[in-house]
């Protein structure tokens, strides 16, 4: 395709219902930032757009959970997210928000154009309704058992365990997440986008890169998993999708007959890219339509794989239906990043939160940028571990990049008072170094334009590897006395590699590149350092990650895991389903007296008890040994569940269960009759 005059780059709008974690960053933002920085460095006209997605059921659910308002939630997390992006050096030209007045106007105008064109179908259907809360329930307001994997707690739009897309009516035993009650079906009218009408042109757009009979993009440049997901949807046949919701939080549908309805979040959120562009254009005396309605602009969406369908099918339908808008030429979606052998989970707090990392390690921004780019899940899921983080920082950034720069600069100061020395006539640094200067930048550029950022970063780091090898082979510290002219040429070459690194790493590690420029005493991109140029003394680009730092982070994750497990256990206790009176009548409870007790061998928690019920004696194994000694329990009258099926515990058949009470500290206490009941008495 022809070289565009402008690049419009978008990164997925993060939900403002919680902070960012490293999975978000690896999924869409670090790669989008590298791409934008690289194009800017080439002199391209770039607009990099993002903002907080502040509508949808997830926001209202968070507000109810925190006993506050949706606006308070989005205000809080918009500020946290925006600051985290800034502190992590994500170079958005504008970071906007969808709760703004200008976004409301833009999205309502967009809806109105489509509605006036007759682009929607108004359908009356039955939707789940909470009779206690007096409201219709959006997808995330409903949970139940997944029909696919049988997991409890699946949402009305997706099961988070098996990943299956669902609709609320698919759920088994649905419940309102607001009241906990079973919802009822009630009629409501919604505006639907008949996506099936658009299958023909979408297939050509996705499969052939064709739009309106003309070449638009090269589908071979799209990632396989992006094409695969799109083709799966298209081959299954596209269904109508509601573009409005019965909610009280969101952009109101601008129609008198749609009171109490808002735009569906996927009708509202991607239009946030457009409203943000309008705001930026107004503030910078630009024409926003140049970026959204000109064939001289290339549109690229950076997203995670969970947003592929929305950016490759639904949003293009909306843009093309509206008319005049350009469509994305590529959607380089990344797969998911896992953490320490498990999926990152916000609900389980199993995550490395970006704002916490930046607070705890404010001087290690580029270290995390380096690691996340090195393991970016470009074509398959990848994994972050703290041990790998430590190894990459210490063995690559410190030992290779930092070591090379430090040696080159220290030797220059030692032998030439920090002045770039003169290269002797006819000197050759060797083929590997010459190839580096001739080809490395082109190779990095090619890889970035193919969205292969991991390889591009390693190609940039290759300069430091070659530099280290060059110094090790030439050994200027040994040559200085016998051949100072050659040493001057060697160190000039080493400094030229440093200057090249300050340029080639700028898109990946901006802080490091700027530190390197400060050391080299340059303020802008230079193709080479001039002989006689004065450089500054060496400062360390990186410091080693010590074991204590890693242990702290791993223990932090482990503590969160244990706290979450305890919290879930507590929630499970609260959510024990009720039983009928008939079920309760099936329980046989009697008073017994412990007459013998011994410790079960090799079991710290277990006592083997002989319990007398008057007409017979039973053996019961009970996990109370951490709370009572064998001697203490002799003579205790206890409450016993008699008709529990016998089972063997450590080789001893237990014939019942002693009922215990547990206090807030986890201490067990016998449930004993307060009067002297006869053993064998029935408990009613």
Image (cartoon, rainbow, N blue to C red):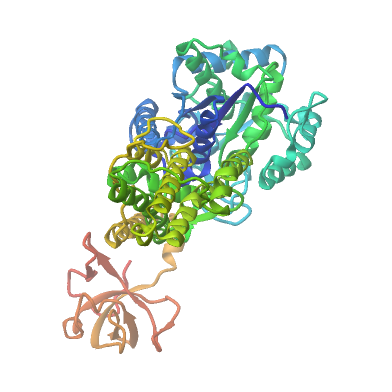
Measuring from the top left, give residue 135's x and y in whole percent: 49, 29
Q: Nearer the viewer, residue 335 or 306?
A: 335
Residue drawn at x 44%, y 31% as measured from the top left: 91
In this image, 63 relative to 10: left or right? left
Residue 396 picture quarter: bottom left
Q: Report the quarter where the N terminus lies.
A: top right
Q: Nearer the viewer, residue 221 or 309?
A: 221
Q: Report the quarter where the C terminus lies.
A: bottom left
Compared with 501, 628 (above or below) is: below
Compared with 3, 403 (above or below) is: below
Q: Can residue 580 be seen in this view?
A: no
Q: Which of 244 and 521 is in front in this view?
A: 521
Compared with 417, 115 (above or below) is: above
Residue drawn at x 35%, y 32% as measured from the top left: 83
Measuring from the top left, give residue 126's x and y in whole percent: 63, 32
In this image, 18 relative to 614: left or right? right
Q: How many marks?
A: 0
In this image, 536 relative to 493: left or right? left
Compared with 360, 48 (above or below) is: above
Q: Is residue 382 visible?
A: yes
Residue 298 picture quarter: top right
Measuring from the top left, give residue 145's x and y in whole percent: 56, 51
Residue drawn at x 44%, y 18% as measured from the top left: 100
Measuring from the top left, give residue 80's x and y in whole percent: 35, 34
Q: Which of 260 and 7 is in front in this view?
A: 7
């Amino acid at each position: 395709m022809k070289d565009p005059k402008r690049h419009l780059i978008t990164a997925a709008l993060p939900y403002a219902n919680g902070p960012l974690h490293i999975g978000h960053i690896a999924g869409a933002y670090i790669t989008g930032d590298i791409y934008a920085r690289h194009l800017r460095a080439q002199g391209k006209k770039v607009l990099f757009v993002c903002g907080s997605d502040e509508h949808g059921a997830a926001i209202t659910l968070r507000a109810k959970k925190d006993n506050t308002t949706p606006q308070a939630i989005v205000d809080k997390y918009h500020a946290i997210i925006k600051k985290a992006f800034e502190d992590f050096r994500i170079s958005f030209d504008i970071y906007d928000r969808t709760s703004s007045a200008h976004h409301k106007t833009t999205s309502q105008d967009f809806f109105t154009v489509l509605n006036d064109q007759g682009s929607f179908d108004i359908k009356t259907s039955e939707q789940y309704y909470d009779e206690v809360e007096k409201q219709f329930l959006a997808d995330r307001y409903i949970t139940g058992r997944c029909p696919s994997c049988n997991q409890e707690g699946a949402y009305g739009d997706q099961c988070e365990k098996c990943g299956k897309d669902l609709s609320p009516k698919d759920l088994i035993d649905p419940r309102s997440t607001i009241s906990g009650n079973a919802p009822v079906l009630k009629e409501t009218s919604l505006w639907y986008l008949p996506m099936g009408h658009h299958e023909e042109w979408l297939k050509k757009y996705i499969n052939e890169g064709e739009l309106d009979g003309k070449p638009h993009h090269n589908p071979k440049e799209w990632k396989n998993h992006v094409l695969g997901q799109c083709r799966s949807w298209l081959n299954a046949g596209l269904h109508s999708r509601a573009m409005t919701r019965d909610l009280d939080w969101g952009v109101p549908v601008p129609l008198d007959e749609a009171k109490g309805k808002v735009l569906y979040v996927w009708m509202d959120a991607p239009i946030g890219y457009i409203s943000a562009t309008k705001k930026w254009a107004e503030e910078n005396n630009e024409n926003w339509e140049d970026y959204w309605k000109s064939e001289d602009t290339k549109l690229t969406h950076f997203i995670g794989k969970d947003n592929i369908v929305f950016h490759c099918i639904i949003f293009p339908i909306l843009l093309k239906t509206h008319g005049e808008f350009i469509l994305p030429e590529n959607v380089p979606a990344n797969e998911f990043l896992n953490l320490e052998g498990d999926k990152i989970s916000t609900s389980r707090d199993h995550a490395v939160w970006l704002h916490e990392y930046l607070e705890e390690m404010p001087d290690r921004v580029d270290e995390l940028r380096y690691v996340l780019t090195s393991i970016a899940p470009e074509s398959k899921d990848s994994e972050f571990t703290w041990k790998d983080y430590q190894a990459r920082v210490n063995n690559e950034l410190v030992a290779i990049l930092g070591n090379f720069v430090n040696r080159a600069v220290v030797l220059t100061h030692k032998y030439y008072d920090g002045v770039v020395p003169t290269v002797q006539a006819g000197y050759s640094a060797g083929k590997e170094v010459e190839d580096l200067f001739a080809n490395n930048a082109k190779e990095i550029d090619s890889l970035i334009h193919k969205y292969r950022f991991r390889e591009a970063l390693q190609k940039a780091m290759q300069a430091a590897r070659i530099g280290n090898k060059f110094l090790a082979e030439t050994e200027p510290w040994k040559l200085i006395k016998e051949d100072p002219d050659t040493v001057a040429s060697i160190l000039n070459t080493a400094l030229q590699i440093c200057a090249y690194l300050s340029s080639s790493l700028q898109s990946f590690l901006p802080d490091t590149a700027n530190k390197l420029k400060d050391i080299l005493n340059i303020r802008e991109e230079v193709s080479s350092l001039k002989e006689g140029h004065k450089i500054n003394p060496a400062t360390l680009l990186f410091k080693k990650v010590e074991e204590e730092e890693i242990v702290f982070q791993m223990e932090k994750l482990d503590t969160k895991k244990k706290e979450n497990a305890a919290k879930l256990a507590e929630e499970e206790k609260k959510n024990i389903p009720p039983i009928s009176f008939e079920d309760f009548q099936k329980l046989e409870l009697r008073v017994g007296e412990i007459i013998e007790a011994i410790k079960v061998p090799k079991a710290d928690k277990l006592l083997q008890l002989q319990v007398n019920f008057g007409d017979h004696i039973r053996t019961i194994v009970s996990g109370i040994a951490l709370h009572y000694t064998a001697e203490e329990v002799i003579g205790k009258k206890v409450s016993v569940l008699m008709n529990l099926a016998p089972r063997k515990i450590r080789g001893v058949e237990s014939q019942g269960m002693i009922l215990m009470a547990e206090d807030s500290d986890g201490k067990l206490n016998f449930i004993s009759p307060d009067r002297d009941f006869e053993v064998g008495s029935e408990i009613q």
